[in-house]
Amino acid sequence: MNHSRWRALVAVALTVSAWLTQSVYGGDGVVRILPDEVRWRDLPGYSGMQGAVLDGDPRKPGVYVLRVRIPPGLMTRPHFHAEDRHITVISGTWWVGADDTFDPAKAVPVKAGGYVKQPAGSHHFDGAKDEEVVLQIIGVGPGGTTFIHPADGPVVSSIESR
């Protein structure tokens, strides 16, 4: 494994470890997290992106639920995930492209309330253009992200690429 990929995996593992205290369980096993109780954490190496684990542990077998907040003008480089991901746009317009080459002009908009399934291994890039985006991601772990061109870094400003 090359040095860049290893650093990215370590950063994600450390971030996920910090998230795991997020879930609030009632005595009946129900998870209850109100909007103002979501504990956002910076995603190292992702230039302002934040995340929160609402339930589960993406590093382990089983269902997990994440929220991701993407600031305006930030998109991820082409990548894929080890598991299927089911994504609902909570707020904003999320832009999704399906290719190994980063080209924000080819991304399609998915507005709040929209849903996208990214099958395991599907190559894509995505992010926010003109407004903040909040996503809810559901998957079955263990999960992971692999960048197609890791030397390019995980994110790029979509504004610079227009």
Image (cartoon, grey):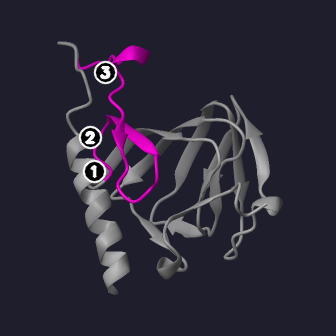
Residue at x 55% of width, y 78% of height:
148
- Mark on residue 84? none
- Mark on residue 15? 1
* Residue at the spot of label 3: 31
Question: What is the number of callouts on the image?
Answer: 3
Range covered by the magenta-colored residues: 29-58
Q: Amino acid at mark 1?
A: Thr
Q: Decide if residue 136 is on the left or right side of residue 92.
A: left
Q: Amino acid at mark 2?
A: Trp
Q: Are marks 2 and 3 in contact (CB under 8 Å)?
A: no
The answer to which of marks 2 and 3 sits earlier in the sequence is 2
Eye-nearest disc, 2 or 3: 2
* Residue at the spot of label 2: 19
Say which quarter of the image contains residue 104: bottom right
Query: Alpha-carbon distance for marks 2 and 1?
Result: 6 Å
Q: Is residue 154 one of those drawn in magenta?
A: no
- Does the image show residue 162? yes
Q: Secondary structure at mark 2?
A: helix
Compared with 50, 34 (above or below) is above
Query: Alpha-carbon distance for marks 1 and 3?
Result: 21 Å
Q: Quadrant of the C terminus?
A: bottom right
Q: Is residue 40 one of those drawn in magenta?
A: yes
Q: Decide if residue 49 is on the left or right side of residue 114.
A: left
Q: Are marks 2 and 1 in contact (CB under 8 Å)?
A: yes
Say which quarter of the image contains residue 41: top left
Q: Decide if residue 135 is on the left or right side of residue 27.
A: right
Residue 146, horizontal then vertical, whole percent: 46, 71
Say which quarter of the image contains residue 75: bottom right
